[in-house]
């Protein structure tokens, strides 16, 4: 059962976190384009698609910790420091996504839909920075999952 849970955990991470990381990373540049061309319906449509990808895959991403806990439980490593650190970092990444990136994307999208001037606000830079933090947290979690400090597997 452990191999099944681990497989589902990895597949969920790749298929859920990957699209969010890519779409969230593309959003600031698309937002700059939308702000530089007020009234461009195609630019706003692109923003709408990227924001929807982020929202949908964020919801699908709930499977990652669910299968992760199932895997850790079956391996008996729930109290291992590397896993606890990974859980904390995963929670931080989820908080950055749910509390900052998605709401900021939604607000920027709403503003881009009604925008009449070409002056670019600070939203693209802030979203790029938040997305960078989100992606960095996932990189650290991925490294912890592979390296597993103190592991006896010699990996």
Image (spheres, rainbow, N blue to C red):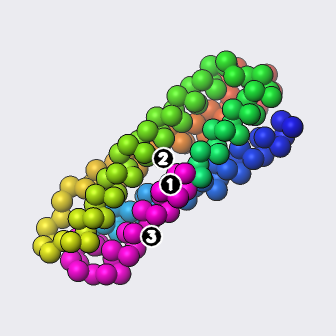
Q: Where is residue 79 in the image (x, y as percent from the top left)?
A: 67, 18
Position of residue 76 relative to residue 47, above or below, is above
Which residue appears at 83% of the width and 43% of the height? 4
Nearer the N terminus, badge 2 or badge 1? Answer: 1
Q: Earlier in the sequence, mark 2 or mark 3?
A: 3
Identify the residue position indicated by label 2 in the image.
135
* C-alpha separation, residue under disc 1 versus residue under disc 3: 14 Å
The reply, left or right, for residue 107 in relation to residue 89 is left
Residue at the limit of the structure toward the right, as seen here = 1
- Classified by dominant secondary structure, the portion drawn in magenta counts as helix
Query: Which mark is drawn over residue 49?
Result: 3
Relative image position of residue 138 (x, y in whole percent): 54, 42
Q: Is mark 2 on a helix, strand or loop?
A: helix
**Residues at badges 2 and 1 in contact (C-beta under 8 Å)?**
yes
Residue 71: quarter of image? top right
Residue 115 in view here:
yes
Is residue 137 positioned above or below 59 on the image?
above
Q: Nearer the viewer, mark 1 or mark 3?
A: 3
Span colored in magenta: 33-59
Give the quadrant of residue 90: top right
Is 122 within the magenta? Answer: no
Q: Quadrant of the C terminus?
A: top right
């Amino acid at each position: 059962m452990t191999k099944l849970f681990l497989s589902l955990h990895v597949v969920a991470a790749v298929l859920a976190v990957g699209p969010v990381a890519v779409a969230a990373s593309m959003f600031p540049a698309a937002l700059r384009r939308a702000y530089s061309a007020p009234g461009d319906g195609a630019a706003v449509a692109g923003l709408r698609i990227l924001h929807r990808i982020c929202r949908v895959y964020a919801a699908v991403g709930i499977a990652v910790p669910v299968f992760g806990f199932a895997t850790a439980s079956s391996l008996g490593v729930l109290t291992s420091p590397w896993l606890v650190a990974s859980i904390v970092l995963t929670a931080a990444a989820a908080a950055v996504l749910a509390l900052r990136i998605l709401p900021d994307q939604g607000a920027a999208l709403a503003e881009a839909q009604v925008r009449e001037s070409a002056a670019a606000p600070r939203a693209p830079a802030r979203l790029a920075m938040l997305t960078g933090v989100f992606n960095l947290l996932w990189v650290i979690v991925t490294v912890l999952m592979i390296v597993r400090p103190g592991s006896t597997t010699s990996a």
